[in-house]
Amino acid sequence: MNQLITDKIVSAGLKRSNLPRIHVAGYGDVIKLKEEIPVSLPDLSSLRDFGGCYIVHGRYLLHAARLKSLAFASMIDLNPLPEFLAAADALRADQPRTRIETIQGDFRNPSMFMSLKPTDAALLYEVLLHQENYMEVLRNVVSCTHRFVCIAQPCIREELFVLPSAAVLLQFYDEALKELLRDGSFWPKESRTEQFNPAFWMWGHTTSHLIDIMHGLGWGLVEGTVVDNVCGRWWEYPLLVFARQQN
Ligand SMILES: C[S@@+](CC[C@H](N)C(=O)[O-])C[C@H]1O[C@@H](n2cnc3c(N)ncnc32)[C@H](O)[C@@H]1O
């Protein structure tokens, strides 16, 4: 009897979102796709990049600011790197009408949002999986974003879960289990932590989880593609654009 109920739940839970899946030559192609997303958004005049500095030095924000001649471009990062600051200065020199704001801050902290100027769109690229309070971060991000929120990050594959919309806290998993989940991915080996540390991978979100929490906040998916082959066997890489729904 119990097995019957479990089977019914498992088969009812199999219905998952059916986004188009693509294969790319390598992560370089994902960078290009991430760069194109804000450029493709209609009538954009302002954009904020949450955590856009590490390795990529603000390229997603600055590329859009240049191509769309944005009036306002904002970067928030715990660590605004000198390479980003130099690239922002170069853009200011070329395009003085674009105001570029850099805020060194922690967006886990709700008070950081109180004085933010709202923007048309926000980028959350590879940052939510590092925040212990990602729901609160998202609530605060949408409160200061008028039209679009773009999310791109490795998501743990749905096949690992019986039910849809799953998220797992993997930061404190046994190292042996983490090692299995790292197989072929770009999740680096990290030192052991027993307290939340946003420098390391904290969450395995499924793609359906991200779509559902944005839905709950009143935002609908308007564009979505899943890259199938850049983060190993247990991870997929969705590129998602959400728009605020009219009430
Ligand atoms: C994994 S990197 C992602 C870089 C880039 N967005 C990308 O997609 O390649 C995470 C970035 O977010 C920043 N970051 C992570 N957590 C943050 C927080 N709570 N507040 C501010 N910045 C944060 C880090 O400093 C880093 O620049």
Image: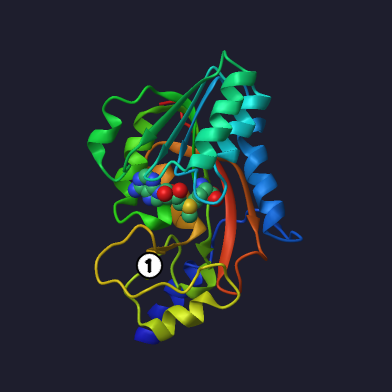
Residue sticking out furthest to the top? 97
The structure residue drawn at horizontal position 25% and vertical position 38%, both measured from the top left corner, is: 110
Say which quarter of the image contains residue 159.
bottom right
Residue 13 vs residue 79, the one in the foreground:
79
The structure residue drawn at horizontal position 74% and vertical position 59%, both measured from the top left corner, is: 24
Q: Against 115, is 207 above or below?
A: below
Residue 185 vs residue 212, the one in the foreground:
185
Could you tell me if residue 127 is visible in this image?
Answer: no
Residue 161 lies, in percent from the top left, at 46, 72
Say which quarter of the image contains residue 64.
top right
Give the labeled residue for mark 1: 168
Residue 145 lies, in percent from the top left, at 42, 29
Left of 77 or right of it: where is 28? Answer: right
Left of 132 or right of it: where is 149? Answer: right
Say which quarter of the image contains residue 115.
top left
Which quarter shows the C terminus?
A: top left
Residue sticking out furthest to the right? 25
Task: Give the crowd class for mark 1: few <14, some 14-19, many >=20 residues within 10 Å.
Answer: few
The structure residue drawn at horizontal position 34% and vertical position 54%, both measured from the top left corner, is: 131
Residue 228 lies, in percent from the top left, at 66, 63
The structure residue drawn at horizontal position 52% and vertical position 54%, both measured from the top left corner, is: 153
Q: Secondary structure at mark 1?
A: strand
Q: Against 246, is 107 above or below?
A: below
Residue 82 lies, in percent from the top left, at 49, 40
Could you tell me if residue 30 is visible in this image?
Answer: yes
Which quarter shows the N terminus?
A: bottom left
Is label 1's Cβ within 8 Å of ligand 1?
A: no
Residue 13 vs residue 102, the one in the foreground:
102
Residue 171 vs residue 245, the one in the foreground:
171
Q: Name the residue type under label 1.
A: Val
Q: Against 88, is 34 above or below?
A: below
